[in-house]
Amino acid sequence: MPTYNQTNIFEVPQVFLDMKAQSFTLQIDDNFSLRILTSEDVSDAYVRWMNDYEIVQYTEQRFYKHTAEDVKKFVSEKLASNTDFLFGMYYDDTHVGNIKLGPIDIFHGAADVSFIIGDKRFWGKGLAVKAIQRVIQFAFIDLKLKRLAAGYYIVNTGSKKVLEKCGFKFEGEQRGRFLFENVRMSHVFVGLVNED
């Protein structure tokens, strides 16, 4: 098994891993914040989101029947990971969605961003844009990452608009990647570089 050249590996600063273990918060404004999720945050409402086709239709989660146990396992795995930050979006202390930074590529200082607004009462309120902008700040300023990437089904115009508002740029399209309601759909790739 080869060993890594440690000088070329990006490492998440230990202070953030320590804070993550304490479920730290990224404040956005007086009402809206992002908080590291723990298994204790998995509510019946959260599990319902994951089983609501309208909410997960543009994700691979639509193929699964989720239980509280499954969701708690996922949240616990992300909490234990040194390369993932899974935040709950909280509006006035109500859990309304999630945003994930990761996995972080330790060799290139890059990471993926994904998000979901699970509480439909908060759709169209601009929360996804605010959450992504705060995660970009955390990724580039605090973690010193160099690049972020995201993707979406080509028919998911909501995600397209949100990511464009946050500065992500079109990078490519994988044609026919997904089967969505019996039609082949493209997967669109977007990215944001720290210099943009």
Image (spheres, rainbow, N blue to C red):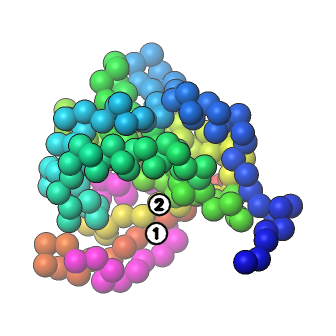
* Residue at 21% from the left image edge and 52% from the top image edge: 66
Tell me where residue 25 appears, x and y as whole percent: 52, 27
Q: Which residue in the rendered view is the most extreme toward the top?
A: 30
Tell me where residue 194 appears, x and y as whole percent: 68, 53
Q: Is 31 colored magenta in this rendering?
A: no
Numbered label tally: 2
When asked about the image quadrant of residue 92, the answer is top left
* Residue at 25% from the left image edge and 39% from the top image edge: 46
* Residue at 59% from the left image edge and 52% from the top image edge: 83
In the picture, the quarter occupied by the N terminus is bottom right
Asked if the residues shown at circle 1 and circle 2 are in contact, with their CB atoms under 8 angstroms apart, the answer is yes
Tell me where residue 97 appears, x and y as whole percent: 32, 38
Marks 1/2: CA–CA distance: 6 Å
Where does label 2 land, which residue?
Answer: 150
Question: Mark 2: which amino acid?
Answer: Ala
Tell me where residue 84 appears, x and y as whole percent: 54, 50
In the picture, the quarter occupied by the C terminus is bottom right
Where does label 1 land, which residue?
Answer: 189
| Up/down of 140 relative to 22, above or below | below
* Residue at 47% from the left image edge and 21% from the top image edge: 29
Region in magenta: 156-179
